[in-house]
Image (cartoon, rainbow, N blue to C red):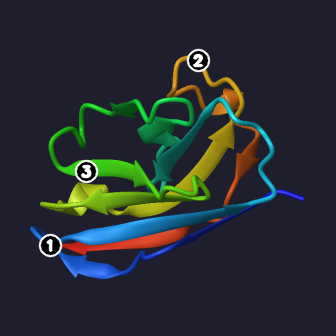
């Protein structure tokens, strides 16, 4: 049984930083990618960042490029999202997702497994 468990979300002031973690268990595929998505109240699910299993290639949404960094632990079972220079518009529920062949990396429907999310609130 696959489980993705996110942690690290909290209330932070604008300009601050947070590091989100996603601990994965039960994953059996060696290709594909793990990603972070977010959903703000009243808005659609939004791709944030992805990292591929094979070569740790990374992809970012334009809105977070230069501020957020996705990485993974050597054991490949934990993915992180380092978020710097946070803005109030980054406030959202952040989800971790894993997929065998998401193409493009931001295609939410291509992801097979999702976590429950961790809440990030950025105050002005």
Looking at the image, which is closer to me, 19 or 12? 19
Asked if the residue at tag 2 contacts the one at tag 1, i.e. Cβ–Cβ closer than 8 Å, the answer is no
Q: CA distance from mark 3 to mark 2?
A: 21 Å
Image quadrant in which the C terminus is located: bottom left
In the shown orientation, is residue 50 left or right of residue 122? right
At numbered mark 1, what does the secondary structure look like: helix, strand or loop? loop
| Above or below for 68 versus 124 | above
**Which residue is denoted by mark 3 in the rendering?**
68
Question: Which of pointers 1 and 3 lies earlier in the amino acid sequence?
Answer: 1
Asked if the residue at tag 3 contacts the one at tag 1, i.e. Cβ–Cβ closer than 8 Å, the answer is no
At 25% from the left and 55% from the top, the residue drawn is 89
**Which residue is denoted by mark 2 in the rendering?**
103
At 26% from the left and 60% from the top, the residue drawn is 83
| Above or below for 22 versus 54 | below
Looking at the image, which is closer to me, 29 or 17? 29
Image quadrant in which the N terminus is located: bottom right
Q: CA distance from mark 1 to mark 2?
A: 32 Å
Looking at the image, which is closer to me, 34 or 56? 56
Image location of residue 69, percent across then percent down? 28, 49
Question: Which of pointers 3 and 2 lies earlier in the amino acid sequence?
Answer: 3
């Amino acid at each position: 049984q696959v489980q993705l468990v996110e942690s690290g979300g909290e209330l932070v002031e604008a300009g601050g930083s947070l590091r989100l973690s996603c601990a994965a268990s039960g994953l059996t595929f060696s290709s594909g990618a793990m990603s972070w998505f977010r959903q703000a109240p009243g808005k659609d699910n939004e791709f944030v960042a992805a990292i591929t299993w094979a070569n740790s290639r990374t992809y970012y949404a334009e809105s977070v490029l230069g501020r957020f960094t996705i990485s993974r632990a050597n054991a490949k079972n934990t993915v992180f999202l380092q978020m710097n220079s946070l803005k109030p518009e980054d406030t959202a529920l952040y989800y971790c997702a894993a997929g065998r062949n998401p193409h493009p990396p931001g295609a939410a429907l291509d992801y097979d497994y999702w976590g429950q999310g961790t809440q990030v609130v950025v105050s002005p």
